[in-house]
Image (spheres, grey):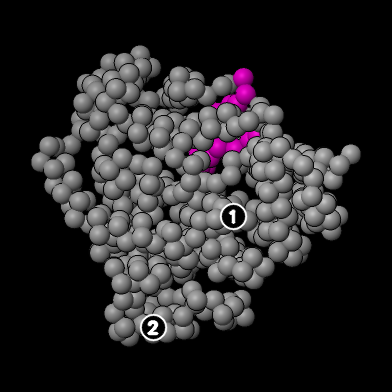
């Protein structure tokens, strides 16, 4: 067996470990009783540690070097490239950090589900702070090993080879575009009048049947997948077993419908990845930019179009009873309605934008004690342009949906504080500028973004 063939065997085993982790996480979000949270966190941490140990085994490095001299086909060469990338990223992160990060994210997610129901942000704050701190540790370790800035090191994990310098011009364009266009659309929307509200009831069991029918119509294969309910919609799984989740609201089926259609876009993409390479790195989705484009193509482009809403109206009537609100024109006003919201799932602008949402913990600085709506840009271009909090944009949207419910840049200048953790932050990093981000304390004063003017902050 050649060195490359040995690597294929090793990475196929790693893929199976990942699949087990995927189902453990899905079960924790959908089926597991709350009392199992602590044990599940330990199980997921163990799986993460096993994967990390196998991937960083020095023998993998030796096999990668030996494979470089072998004659390989195009797919094999691409697979070897992805193997080397996975190996280099994995060995940059210490094993104890892998374990700690897995445990912290599991604990925070389970606490968040409880805190969300109680509207109690303070309950999740300490665990969230731990996740942020460990994310910074991972960014520092990856950046040092890969010769990247901390944020670029995180971003590279979601969209290979993409850098902050590539994204900053996009934000500059949106910063100039969104505020005035949003006002224009809100004005036209107000002049046209609101959509007629529905008068029928929406039983959850009928909503479940409807979203299953819509997912299948769009192209989801239920012989290789399923739809369930969770605190927050997501899509997960592996080849032959894709899992979609959504939430349901008795007063409005729109949330469940659009959430399922969005996650169906993700899953259709995954269901059509090359089956012959399903257990190899080259057979996996490489980045979130294309992934999100597929989900948003379905949800925002296709399924909010006049043609689809004309199809949806009769289905709503058959499921819930005749109602004038199901007329296609009214559905268009309802499902393409533009509004502002600080709640991410309710804001098209806040939805995951091409993989940047998780690394945003690093670049778009959060001060957790001020609440989850406070974001701070610190790219030079963002400071020059607006000096305001960030609005996360899905670039796969239509113009109308892209500005749906944004946190408006110009009006949401937040005086949020940031506690600089010097021991965690490489001083050489260009992203960390002491003049821009001075240390803060309880009741700190700092320099506001874009103004250079000292302001007093509430307690951190």
Residue 21 image point, x, y percent: 71, 43
Q: Secondary structure at mark 2?
A: strand
The residue positioned farthest toward the right in the image shown: 1
Q: Is residue 33 left or right of residue 182?
A: right
Task: Tell me if I can see residue 46 in this picture.
Answer: no
Residue 231 lies in the magenta stretch: yes
Residue 59 image point, x, y percent: 86, 55
The tag on residue 446 is 2
Residue 275 lies in the magenta stretch: no
Looking at the image, which residue is at 12% across and 37% down? Answer: 192
Looking at the image, which residue is at 60% across and 26% down? Answer: 225
Mark 2 is surrounded, within 10 Å at the Cα level, by few (under 14), some (14 to 19) or many (20 or more) other residues, namely: many
Residue 42 image point, x, y percent: 75, 52
The tag on residue 157 is 1
Residue in the foreground of this view, choosing between 392 and 34:
392
**Range of magenta residues:** 223-238
């Amino acid at each position: 067996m050649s060195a490359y063939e040995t690597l294929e065997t090793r990475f196929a085993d790693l893929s199976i470990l990942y699949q087990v982790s995927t189902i453990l996480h899905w079960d924790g979000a959908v089926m597991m009783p709350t009392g199992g949270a602590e044990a599940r966190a330990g199980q997921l941490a163990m799986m993460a540690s096993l994967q990390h140990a196998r991937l960083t085994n020095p023998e993998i490095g030796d096999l990668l070097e030996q494979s470089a001299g072998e004659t390989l086909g195009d797919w094999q060469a691409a697979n070897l490239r992805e193997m080397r990338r996975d190996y280099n990223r994995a060995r940059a992160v210490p094993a104890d950090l892998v374990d700690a990060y897995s445990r912290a994210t599991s604990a925070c997610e389970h606490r968040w589900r409880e805190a969300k129901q109680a509207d109690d942000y303070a309950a999740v704050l300490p665990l969230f702070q731990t996740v942020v701190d460990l994310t910074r540790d991972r960014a520092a370790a990856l950046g040092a090993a890969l010769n990247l800035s901390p944020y670029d090191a995180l971003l590279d994990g979601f969209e290979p080879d993409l850098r902050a310098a590539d994204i900053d011009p996009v934000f500059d364009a949106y910063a100039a575009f969104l505020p005035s266009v949003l006002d224009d659309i809100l004005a036209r929307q107000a002049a046209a009048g609101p959509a007629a509200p529905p008068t029928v009831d929406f039983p959850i069991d009928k909503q479940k049947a409807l979203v299953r029918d819509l997912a299948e119509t769009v192209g989801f294969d239920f012989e290789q997948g399923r739809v369930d309910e969770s605190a927050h919609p997501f899509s997960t799984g592996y080849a032959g077993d894709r899992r979609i989740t959504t939430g349901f609201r008795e007063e409005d089926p729109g949330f469940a419908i659009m959430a399922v259609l969005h996650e169906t876009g993700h899953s259709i993409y995954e269901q059509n990845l090359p089956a012959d390479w399903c257990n190899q790195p080259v057979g996996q989705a490489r980045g979130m930019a294309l992934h999100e484009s597929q989900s948003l193509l379905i949800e925002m482009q296709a399924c909010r179009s006049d043609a689809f809403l004309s199809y949806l109206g009769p289905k709503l009537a058959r499921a819930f009873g005749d109602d004038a609100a199901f007329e296609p024109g009214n559905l268009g006003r309802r499902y393409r309605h533009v509004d502002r919201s600080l709640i991410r799932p309710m804001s098209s602008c806040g939805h995951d934008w091409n993989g940047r949402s998780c690394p945003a913990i690093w670049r778009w600085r959060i001060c957790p004690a001020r609440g989850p709506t406070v974001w701070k840009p610190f790219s030079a271009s963002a400071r020059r342009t607006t000096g305001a909090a960030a609005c996360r944009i899905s670039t796969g949207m239509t113009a109308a949906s892209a500005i749906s419910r944004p946190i408006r840049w110009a009006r949401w200048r937040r005086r949020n504080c940031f506690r600089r953790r010097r021991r965690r932050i490489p001083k050489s990093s260009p992203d960390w500028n002491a003049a821009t981000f001075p240390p803060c304390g309880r009741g700190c004063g700092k320099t506001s973004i874009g103004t250079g003017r000292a302001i007093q902050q509430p307690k951190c």
